[in-house]
Amino acid sequence: MPRTRPVRFANMTDRTLDLDDFSDLIERPHGGLRRDAEERRARTGLPPEALGRLDELGEWLTAAQGRLPVAPVRQPRLVVFAGDHGVASLEVSARPAGTAHTLVRETLEGTTPAAILARRLQVPVRVVDMGLDCDPSEFPDELTRHRVRRSSGRLDREDSLTAEEAEAAFRAGMAVADEEADAGTDLVVLGDLSVGGTTAAGTLIAALCGTDASVVTGRGGGEIDDLTWMRKCAAIRDGLRRARAALGDQLELLAAVGGADLTAATGFLLQSAVRRTPVILDGVVSAACALVAQRVAFRAPDWWVAGHAGSEPAQAKALDRMSLDPLLEQRVEVGGGTGALLALPLVQAAAELAAELPVREDEAADGESGEDEDGSGGEDGAANSPALDAT
């Protein structure tokens, strides 16, 4: 499927990243083709709503691809942003601070739930080290080349990143999105690997939703005990005081409490929307990044689906704010893209059904070529739209 080529903008090569450009460059998926997909589905002879949400997913993919009938999902990829968070030193997680690199190593060895599912589903895995607390020589250069720092600052008392580090991380996420689009990836499953990441995510969501720390503080991926929960809630409370002062500038907000991995994932989500690459969100961390991205460009969530609902209250808050209804509710908490990978077969099935269900010939219309009113195909229109350049 064709992908938009990045175009260099003068203001994107300046020292300061101008996030306002995303509002202009991100368009909604092709609404006209979505309506055509609904009409085509009606001509299959199946009763309305017989396929449940699979119909909705097929129509979403039709609009995202800009083609009718929709093409099957052939080149999905799991993209995982990894990093450690300084706030983990407060013992807010079930895992020791600075040990996210062990999660990355287990993923590369194929022993994590996400890695096992990805292997079963034949989905390539890409891990991007943005701020692991380990020597970069422990991993291949391809994995560490985007790293902006080792771990992050303690969000309860200091910025997670400097302004320069935040911009570098954001641009790195954009660059990864461009690389995936150029490689032909037709659907991204977004994951994260971190220690302390759910604390950063809860702080971002509380700030953007205007709620208190206790409302968004969950048990994380390791089912922490009550004392650890109280420490985590206190850290979010203190980070929230600092985050509220940065609500007017989303890059400043990410620098204050987001960390390198969440900042990169936010840039990735926005640039994926520019490049018209649909994304399946995973848990609370990707939901937090998506919520920040929505503040940057309100049309961006049209390019994402929520893969699953976990037990984190902050995730539910963020998805509700973005009007995203999770595809599954299995209460998966292990992260790394596991819940989103479980939803992938549903999305693939929706595409296959939308593409291959026969249409009644006596009712078939002539206009199934996926052309716009001006006669140009939806894909050509996508190929001519501008895109940001991360460099």
Image (cartoon, grey):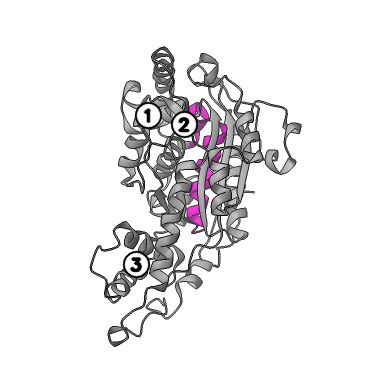
Left or right: 277 in relation to 8: left
Mark 1 surroundings: few (<14), some (14-19) or many (≥20) residues within 10 A: many
Q: CA distance from mark 1 to mark 3?
A: 34 Å
For disc 1, the marked residue is: 207
| Cβ atoms under marks 1 and 2 closer than 8 Å | yes
- Whether residue 69 appears in this view of the structure is no
Q: Based on the displayed image, in which of its 4 quarters is residue 86 positioned?
A: top right
Q: Residue furthest right?
A: 137
What is the three-letter code of the residue carrying label 2?
Leu
Q: Residue at x 32, y 63 (%)?
A: 55
**Which x, y percent locates residue 180?**
59, 54
Front residue (pair 199, 172): 199
Q: CA distance from mark 1 to mark 2?
A: 9 Å
For disc 3, the marked residue is: 34
Which span is picked out in magenta? Answer: 251-276
Q: Based on the displayed image, in which of its 4 quarters is residue 40 positioned?
A: bottom left
| Cβ atoms under marks 1 and 3 closer than 8 Å | no
